[in-house]
Amino acid sequence: MVDMNERYARRLFFKQAGALGLSAASLSAFLAACGSAATTTTASSVDLAGPIAIETLLEKAKKEGKLEAIGIPPEWADYKDILDTYTSKYVKVQYQAEAEFSSAQELEVFKKSKLHPHGDIGDVGFKFGPQAVQQGLVTPYKHSKWDDIPAELKDPKGNWCTEYWGAQAFIINTDLVKNEPTSFKDLLNGDYKNMVGIDGDPREANDAFISVYSAALATSGSLDSIQPGIDFFAQLKRKGNFTVARSSLANVTKGEVAIAIMWDYLGLGFRDQLKGKPNLKVIIPSDGSIAGPYVSIINKTAPDPYAARLWMEYIFSDEGQLNYLKGYAHPARYQSLVKAGKVPTELAAKLPPAEQYANVKFVTDLSKLDAAATALSNNWQSQVLGQ
């Protein structure tokens, strides 16, 4: 993803918040603290549950000498700048090919780490945070900005915490697509042969999973079942409009995916990187889009536990959160940054109009997410790919 500078002003945020259906009360809840006070730490006796003083973390992280990052793609949410800054300030980051791992693959790395410690931190879709806890793969850490994070976007015991969120959007190659779709319905009705792609296998990749769920919202108006979304993609495939090519930057650049359904911040980042080669336009579908939080987790058997906690402190710091914003992701601490007057305004003109977010919904009900994941796992292959 990308970096940051300054973004929407307070007025624009509340306009978007209103578009998302967030009331003043829910906005207050969005800032409500739910973390408990943590034990004071010293260099000789450290409470790993946090928070831990930066000086202590830095001293111990430097002795570890590195951070092993899993599922932290540099092109995603300005992670390139976040990774570079963390390396220059603290210790080097090892991420390489594992940067592109899906949420499911990240948990698999943590699982294998029980035998051979590998992988310190991960960035996974919202529903994978609780799964990691259930599987005993993560360890709790409540960073120093814990109280700024809304209660519904973090684990009360500190096992996972939302860093940022995005909304599902259409990323359209306007050099190839002259009749721009503005809704999921348009994707079925238009002549978009082999043009529409999603970001990987929806049974494994959270971005793709939420794209199918968003299609369900668009076609049925409900978050109670993902099946209408599966039916939608089955229709899209029968029509010949759906391509199994992943909506990666490479495939979007080559035109193999001319209409990508993925996070808004990814599309906006692609648009900036490609600089008109090809030309891209980012549109939030008018008939339904789901906002997806991503959460940070620490491997229970992390080989570099202090570097992992130092990473958490950095990404939730003002600088780290603003970097997410520069990458067009919505930082979890956005409101507290606005209140402190730390959010810039230059990015506002680069964002989709606030009114496009009118139908964006949050899904933090884990039972609904679990039911949707199960239905997708059972039906995607036979009903969509198997045709």
Image (cartoon, rainbow, N blue to C red):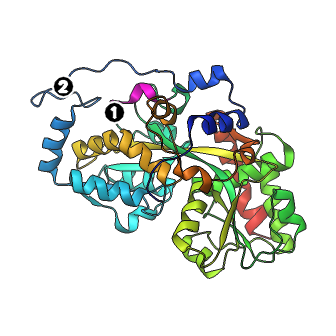
Give me the residue at 68% from left, 29% from top.
22
Q: Is residue 63 magenta?
A: no
Q: Nearer the viewer, residue 132 or 200?
A: 200
How many callouts does the rendering have?
A: 2
Image mark for residue 277: none
Q: Secondary structure at mark 2?
A: loop
Q: Is residue 148 magenta?
A: yes
Give me the residue at 24% from left, 46% from top.
307
Quarter of the image for residue 341 reads: top left
Q: Position of residue 7 (x, y in %)?
A: 52, 46
Q: Secondary structure at mark 1?
A: loop
Residue sticking out furthest to the bottom: 254
Residues in magenta? Answer: 143-149
Per the image, the residue denoted by label 1 is 141
Q: Is residue 142 above or below residue 345?
A: above
Q: Amino acid at mark 2?
A: Thr
Q: CA distance from mark 2 to mark 1?
A: 13 Å
Q: Position of residue 286 (x, y in %)?
A: 80, 50
Per the image, the residue denoted by label 2 is 41
Q: Is residue 327 above or below residue 365?
A: below
